[in-house]
Image (cartoon, rainbow, N blue to C red):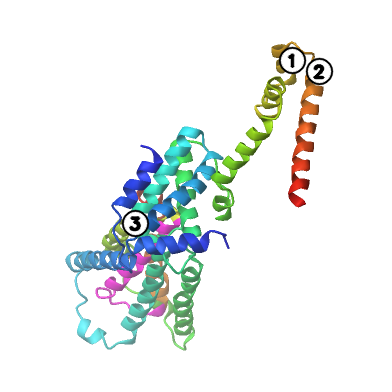
Amino acid sequence: MIAQEAQYRAWMLAALAGDAGAYRMLLAGLTRHLRGYYARRLDSGAAEDAVQETLIAIHVRRATYDPSLPFTAWVYGIARYKLIDEYRRHKRGATVPLEEAGDLFGHDEAEAASARRDVTKLLGKLSPAKRRLVQDIKLDGVSVADAAARTGMSESAVKVTVHRAIKALGADVERKADDADR
Amino acid sequence: MRTDDLIAQLSGGLEPVKGGAVARLLLGATGLGLAGSILVMLVMLGWRYDIHAAVTSFGIWTKLIYTLTIAAFGFWLVERAGRPGADMTRPALLLATPLLGIAFLAAAQISAPGADIPVLVMGQSSRTCAINVLMVALPTLAATFWALRRMAPTRLTLAGAGAGLFAGAAGAFVYCFHCTETAAPFIAIWYTLGIALSAATGALLGRMLLRW
């Protein structure tokens, strides 16, 4: 059972009875899941379009939700159909594996965003030069050679700097976790 | 448009949905489709001349019950196919009941002493039966597709096949009022073939016509 099932189903039943407030909460909640789902499969412009198309489809076809069945499975069916439709429109031969609705609801865009915030905060503890190196090599995938050319450092110096910075950040996180435990 | 604005717009104009909306849509489409199928049967084929005598015969009831049972499970199949995330296994498995029933009855008639097997199997109209069933089914097939397009089928070929199966069985039911064949082996072969043709037509058209 998907964790959000009970809450979303309650909102959906209220929405079918005409409760606009519940419906807004439902669509806002679903948007977060849909963003994560499409962002992992489409490029960013197409992903937001797919989110909107799916919201419209959910709206127009909301009468096809059978209250005796799981709501999350219904939404997932629509999201997956829209994804296949998007692939088909761009003549991409991609096949969409049969996944479970958990694939849509397991990842939450809000969670990913908060993880990104944590990383940014953590990187803020480094000096600007080190931060730039860690950002380039560990997050953006710049090669060590390119980073060395940019900074004028030797490749091995770059590697050592990044390694030490990561180690320092790791120690910092561990210390915080210890403090929290106490 | 920003997604937040879209959400505000969709929830702002929210209308309540009455319970049983899908059932009413499908029943309405079935009514329209059947009217069309009956019209095709009357205009192109005509009532069977012995309809008064036939309603008391075993043969016509075999046909009516066989086609009606398939139509009922087909209707259920279409209702499931139009709902994302709904399981179609149960109605699909239940379709085996009428098929087994008619096969059993056909086997009994063929193995009865003194059975004239070529007559039981080929009847008078084996050459036209399946095509006629398909022709009578077409209006109901069109109406079922119309309803499915207002639902949300996610497996289009399967949904189309379900619609074709339902329409084929409904068409065969209507065709019973024209056709004078009564032997179970004939029904088991030629009526079933007509229904299968309709299901195949629906499966082929589904991918093209049911997209949304």
Magenta stretch: helix, strand or loop mostly: helix
Q: Is residue A30 left or right of residue A140?
A: left
Q: Are marks 2 and 3 on the same chain?
A: yes
In the image, B148 versus A28, the foreground residue is A28
Residue B6: percent from left, percent from top: 36, 44
How many residues crowd mark 2 within 10 Å: few (<14), some (14–19), many (20+)?
A: few
The residue that disc 3 covers is A20
Mark positioned earlier in the residue sequence (2 or 1): 1
Mark positioned earlier in the residue sequence (2 or 3): 3
Inspect the image, locate mark 1, and give the three-letter code of the amino acid beneath it: Ala
> Are dots 2 and 1 in contact, CB under 8 Å?
yes
Residue B157: percent from left, percent from top: 44, 54
Residue in the image at 76% along x and 51% along y: A181
Residue A23 position by quadrant: bottom left
Residue A148: mark:
1
How many residues crowd mark 3 within 10 Å: few (<14), some (14–19), many (20+)?
A: many
The residue that disc 2 covers is A157
Magenta residues (range)? B158-184
What secondary structure is found at the residue carrying circle 3? helix
Residue in the image at 35% along x and 76% along y: B68
In the image, B136 versus B116, the foreground residue is B136
Residue A83: percent from left, percent from top: 48, 44
Inspect the image, locate mark 2, and give the three-letter code of the amino acid beneath it: Ala
A15 drawn magenta: no
